[in-house]
Image (cartoon, helix red, strand yellow):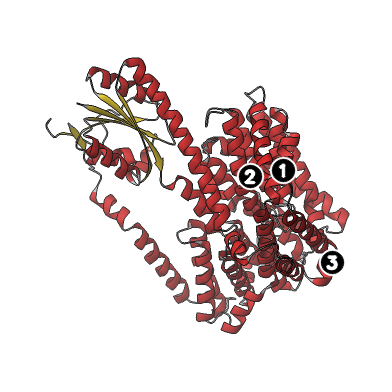
Amino acid sequence: MSVKIDTRPIWVLLGLKALRPLFFVTLAASFLYILGMTTPEGLTPEGQKAIAVFAVCLVLWVTNVIPLAITSILAIVLVPFLGVLSTRETYALFGNEAVFFILGAFILAGAVMGSGLSTRIALYMLSRFGSSPKKLVLAIFLLSAALSFFMSEHAVAAMLFPIVLEISKSLGIRPGRSNYGKLLFLALAWGCVIGGIATFLGGARVPLAVGILNEMTGQTIGFLDYAVAVFPLVVILLILGFIILMRSFPMDIQGVEGAAEALGKKLKALGKVRYTEYAVGVVMLATVLAWMFLGRRLGLSSIALTSVVFLFVLKLVRWKDIEEYVNWGIILMYGGAIILGSSLHKSGAAEWMVNGMVGSWATSPWSVILVFSLLALFLTEGMSNAAVIAVLLPASIAIADKLALDPALVTFAIAVPAGLAFMFPMSTPANALAASSNYISMRDMMRAGVIVNVLAWVLFNLVAAFWWPLIGMGY
Amino acid sequence: MKKVLLVLPSYISSDEALDLAVRRAREDKAALVALYLIAAGAADDVFDAFSDIGFIGDRPSSQVSEAMMKEYRQRGYEELGKVQIRAMEEGVAFEPLMEAGEPVEKVLSAIEGMGITTAVLVKRKERAILRYFQRSYADEVAEKAPCEVIVFTGGQGPIKEDKKDVKEVDRGRA
């Protein structure tokens, strides 16, 4: 009989035990060191404090040691505590339009999911168009993308995931061994990611970026303006993404009869379309149209919240249900990110950092767009896309000021690539879901994802160079 | 009666481990116990990613978790079915188990509760540099189990005894 004894060095064992406290002590020491440093030339004392807070939040956002929303709370506490902004000014930033737009959009998405409308649409589309192996993958890919035009890509991934699992089971696919399994789950993840950049509704990062832009410059980007600017990128990425999927994982099944049967059963179990589904669909459609055509005049958040009120007036949802579909951490997360961005801008820290660190290469508008889009694309693989925006946008807007470049352009250059995470499971929940199914390995995801990532960056810059001037957004 | 325990984690499988466990049970005239492990954090990791990033609420997240756990359980039945067929072919008595929870705790309680004499475990291949900073459940079980433990690395043979950070210690046979 035998047992294995751990003979690793004692310092390793103790180090592993003390890792977390050590991390926080080091972080606190670094924070105090930045605060205690002699203020560099050209930087205000408030700017130095803002940079200290920014550094701490950056480390916590990247490492995810504490939840993102809690990191934001830390920013909310530290900014007025250190006197970077007044308490009143800090908390007033919570009333930012972007935060309420995000909240309204999520409540609306919750109503669509809660009513069962999104599931019905998904099952109908898949059973209608998924008649062959290739068509089924395409249907999942396009459906994920199309639904992500109207609701959070993460919510879409969560909603479609059980359906795709059911399909895989019905086809008798072996997890990790079958190329078709890899195709199905990557189609789901990539569809959500690509569709998620198409409008303000695919994720909260674009409203957040517009919120920070508005706080810093007074400028804004309209719902329709944004959609038109990124439309070609979305279309081309969908086409090329599907081709790359098919090339990367050649199909290894002949038919999908089992899936059709499973989908048919599920659709039948839903019964006839109910009044609630119709009504929620109409409210959602009216809201999207209002955002498109009345957004600038009435304000996106006012339209979103009006629709939310309508949902309750028409008795389509109950507060209890809505609470279960909305994660209230988003209010903290985005409020904190806007506060951090504003504190960097108003204290002059953003401008100082730009002059000191990136001023040398930022000599022309195109180099700014190229570099910031690459940075956003790279960083979003390792941290939350909202954190990427909070980190990069204040500095990029300061550079735009310096080069007399429209700040809206750099906002696009960060907000759009920040949503394009294809490589790692931890990059976005859609990828995390696909990987956790065990149908696809991390290596598979990286192998195919790196190609799409490079392609996305090149395409984004081509769209910026050739499409934007055509719609009056040239640089 | 002697008992051989074959531990099947949900994220990795090894035909060599199955072969060895069945052969060992047959040679020792022992019963084969197959334990399919559903890692506690498997669905929770995804749930946390969703709720931590803050994009969707509890209901969709728990629906995802449920779907995933259901999937893992179904896979468990399939894996256990495969082991059962092998055991029947070799004329070995077979007992299936499925547990969700902390792997080390579940394996050790199965070893102690069922009087296991030999445990066959499978673990992922680990990078040398990471060996100092993280330990697999298999290493921990090997350290604490009161029986013979054979560890397979995914897709490879049983681990040799020349690893720098572990040693075989003879506790004497009961």
- The amino acid on which the numbered mark 1 sits, given as a three-letter code, is Leu
- The amino acid on which the numbered mark 2 sits, given as a three-letter code, is Leu
Q: Is residue A23 visible?
A: yes
- Where's the C terminus of chain B, which quadrant? top left
Q: Looking at the rendered structure, which numbered label has been put on residue A294?
A: 3
Secondary structure at badge 2 equals: helix
Compare residues A129 and A318 and report the one nearer the observer.
A318
Chain of the residue that carries numbered disc 3 in the rendered image? A
The residue shown at (68%, 55%) is: A115
Instruction: Give the crowd class for mark 3: few <14, some 14-19, many >=20 residues within 10 Å.
Output: some
Distance of label 2 from label 3 (alpha carbons)? 31 Å
A103 displayed left or right of B143: right
Chain of the residue that carries numbered disc 2 in the rendered image? A
Pointers 1 and 3 within a single chain: yes
Distance of label 2 from label 1 (alpha carbons)? 9 Å
What residue is shown with label 1?
A143
- Give the mark, 2 or 3, whose residue is nearer the N terminus: 2
- Where's the N terminus of chain B, which quadrant? top left
Residue A394: horizontal and vertical position, in percent? 65, 67
- Give the mark, 2 or 1, whose residue is nearer the N terminus: 1
- The amino acid on which the numbered mark 3 sits, given as a three-letter code, is Leu
Q: Are marks 2 and 1 in contact (CB under 8 Å)?
A: yes
A268 displayed left or right of A20: right
Q: Nearer the viewer, mark 2 or mark 3?
A: 2
Chain of the residue that carries numbered disc 1 in the rendered image? A
Q: Is residue A424 visible?
A: no
What residue is shown with label 2?
A160
